[in-house]
Image (cartoon, rainbow, N blue to C red):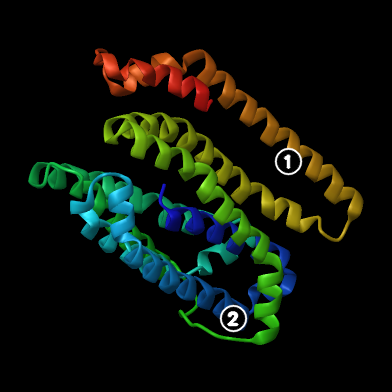
Amino acid sequence: MRFDDVLHRAGEQFCRNHCHRAGPRGEQAAYAGDRAFLPVRAGADLRDSAIRCRSLCGRIFGVPEVAWAFQLLALIPIIDGMKHIDYVRFHRKLSFWRSVVVRELPQLFTLLACIPLGMWLGDYRVMLYVLILYGLSYTVLSHLVAKRPYQMAWDSTFIRKIFSFGAPLLLNGFLLFFILQGDRAIVGSVLGPEALGLFSAAYMLTFTSSALVTNVMQTVLLPVLSKAKGSVDAFWVRTVFVMQAASFVGLGFAIFFIVLGGVFSCWFSGSVMPPRRRCWPSSVLCMA
């Protein structure tokens, strides 16, 4: 998971949460323009940071010859910042088909693209171009399903309200980056790229599945909480239900990977693993 991917998740969560929390203002076109301006600004800053740090990242992971790849990845924050967030507004009406199109079709496109790219390139450049293709398709589809025209605006009143709500999420994004990527930096710099690949595979096997379910639950349950905002009693009842549902799902995932994580990881990597890969099932267990 890249730094811009962490901020992408935080930004998407911010747009979704704030659109529900904003009440009637969430339907205003000017308000949407202010929300569209901030990702573009953040994407430009992330691009500049990635370009400046490309050589440092290459030296840390012992691959200075691929510093150009880090520079090319700097395009992704800009592409992601240009996405249209109008599809989030329809969550207030419990209409999610636009979100399904925007989130799932890019994954299908990139999955299909992996085959010809793998046959053509056959190295790490496949993932590099897949990430860029995913960002492009995500942004294009977000514009295709939107009903309102794309616009950027700056209203100081709205911006202050957005920052007052989004600042903790932005801080959380930074903390998530250092928490989730600090161990990878240590493993990659000390043990080498192969150990980093095994560690990352175990991490993604557990994190991606749980993050997918968490994202679905947030998308479905936040509008339910938003509709009970005017009643303290109803809001409390629904909050308890949401917390119980989240705890139940989280416990189920933990039990699944604790009991079947080793078998699942062996099946995922193939029935025969080299000696150095035998640590993968234990890594999956630790991640669970």
Picture coordinates of residue 82, whole percent (x, y): 41, 72
Residue receiving disc 2: 29
- The image quarter containing residue 280 is top left
Q: Amino acid at mark 2?
A: Ala
Badge 1 crowding class, 10 Å Cα cut-off, few under 14, some 14 to 19, many 20 or more, is some
Question: At x 24% / y 16%, what residue is drawn?
Answer: 274
- Identified at 27% across, 49% down, the residue is 110
At label 2, counting other C-alpha atoms closer than 10 Å, the crowd grade (few under 14, some 14-19, many 20 or more) is some
Picture coordinates of residue 130 (x, y %)? 26, 51
Q: Which residue is mark 1?
A: 242
Which secondary structure, mark 2? Answer: helix
Pick whichever, 60 or 23, lies toward us.
60
Q: Nearer the viewer, residue 287 or 101?
A: 287
Residue visible at 40% across and 70% down in the picture? 143
Tell how many labels: 2
Please provide percent x and percent y for residue 226. 74, 57
Q: Position of residue 39 (x, y in %)?
A: 49, 70
Is residue 154 shown above or below 184?
A: below
Compare residues 91 and 279 and report the one nearer the observer: 279
